[in-house]
Image (cartoon, coloured by chain):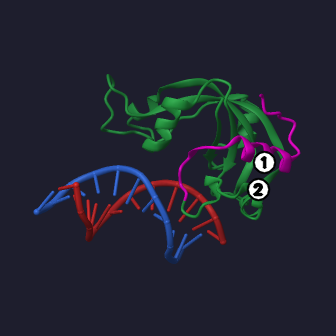
Chain colours: A green, B blue, C red
Amino acid sequence: MRLWLMKSEPDVYSIDDLARDRRTTWEGVRNYTARNSLRDDAKVGDLVLFYHSNAEPSGIAGVAKIAREAYPDPTQFDRKSAYYDAGAKKDDPRWLMVDVQFVERFAEVIPLARLKSDPALAGMPVIAKGQRLSVQPVTREHFAHVLAIANAKTELPR
DNA sequence: GCCAACGTTGGC
DNA sequence: GCCAACGTTGGC
């Protein structure tokens, strides 16, 4: 299995929203690197660190998992959507999305500053300056350490 | 609200 | 194919 970190602005969709909905469609990915990760590597059951961006504080808020593999994101064809893409063709969709299922909400958000200050998380993409990628791979070691920091209930499958 | 960093676009 | 201009992300 692979492990991920996915960003969402909590004003748009937060871990609490996911806890309420239990499952959601992850539409709106509009970056080719992120799309390629979803298309090529995201599998049902992969665990995801749910990251709050543009938040107070920004940081990791909980855990989700991939519930459906990549399929065309309908908002690319919706003129009324903020995610509309005039260049996307119905017979050759440009943008894909996955479905995501709630796993766990951390007792407290792990702030970005906390992540940055932890030597065990050195090299984790999300703490790099200027890193904007909204779907990032996470190593098993980093993922496990984040779960430990959060005193999480979630356990990493072997 | 500011602005650094980054990805994308488009002229050449 | 280069790269300047532009738009967006996201921390602060």
From the image, which quarter does the C terminus of chain A lie in? Answer: top right
Tell me the residue that label 1 is attached to: A146
Q: Quick check: can you spot residue A82?
A: no
Residues drawn in magenta:
A131-158
| In the image, residue A36 lies in the stretch drawn in magenta | no
Magenta stretch contains residue A143: yes
Mark 1–mark 2 contact, CB under 8 Å? no
Determine which quarter of the picture holds residue A4: top right
- The quadrant in which the N terminus of chain A is found is top right
Q: Which residue is mark 2?
A: A120
Q: Is residue A87 visible?
A: yes
Question: How busy is the neighbourhood of tag 2: few (under 14 within 10 Å), some, or many (20 plus)?
Answer: few
Amino acid under disc 2: Ala
Q: CA distance from mark 1 to mark 2?
A: 9 Å
Query: In the depicted view, which residue is nearer to us: A116 or C4?
Result: A116
The image quadrant of residue A63 is top right
Q: Nearer the viewer, mark 1 or mark 2?
A: 2
